[in-house]
Image (spheres, rainbow, N blue to C red):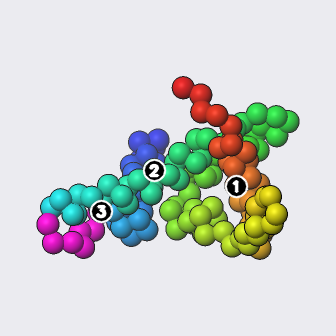
Amino acid sequence: MKEAGQRCQQENLIEQHKNSVRSLTAPLDNLNSNWAYMVIASLAWSLKAWCALQLPEVGRQKAERAATKRRLLTMDFATFQHAMIQVPAQIIRTGRRIVYRMLAWNRWQEAFFHLADQLRRPLRC
């Protein structure tokens, strides 16, 4: 039964690569261009997984944050694009600072801000 679920998940990933990210389409005229298009589209897909893996799972709400991380990892790319990339914001440049105002709310904003805090920290190798 578990193997069937894993196969179904693999089929979902292939479907999302075909339709959401369009990494398996070949819109250009030669193999090098098609290869570059596929790599760029796959990098966009990897960005989703990388963002999810960067989210911390510490603090009092460890179980909730782990569940959010798992949902973000299994999210389809179109939903990720609307929730985390195409966020309407107003950027205001004042005297000595830049202010970012979020103009809409969605349920992924908490994860978005946790990710922003995590990205501000230096990388650990």
Position in image of residue 48 (x %, y %): 53, 53
Q: Residue furthest right?
A: 60
Give the secondary structure at mark 2: helix
Give the secondary structure at mark 1: helix
| Residue 112 - label | 1
* Occupied quadrant, residue 117: top right
Q: Residue furthest left?
A: 30
> Which class describes the residues within 10 Å of circle 3: few (<14), some (14-19), or many (20+)?
some
The disc labelled 3 sits on which kind of residue?
Answer: Tyr
* Occupied quadrant, residue 45: bottom left
Relative to 20, say whether 61 is above or below: above
First in sequence: mark 3 vs mark 2: 3
Asked if labels 1 and 3 touch by Cβ distance under 8 angstroms, the answer is no
The disc labelled 1 sits on which kind of residue?
Answer: Phe
Position in image of residue 62 (x %, y %): 77, 37
The disc labelled 2 sits on which kind of residue?
Answer: Ser
* Occupied quadrant, residue 82: bottom right
| Residue 46 - label | 2
CA distance for labels 3 and 1: 27 Å
First in sequence: mark 2 vs mark 1: 2
Span highlighted in magenta in the image: 24-30
Quarter that holds the C terminus: top right
Position in image of residue 73 (x %, y %): 56, 49
Specify whether residue 15 is in view: no
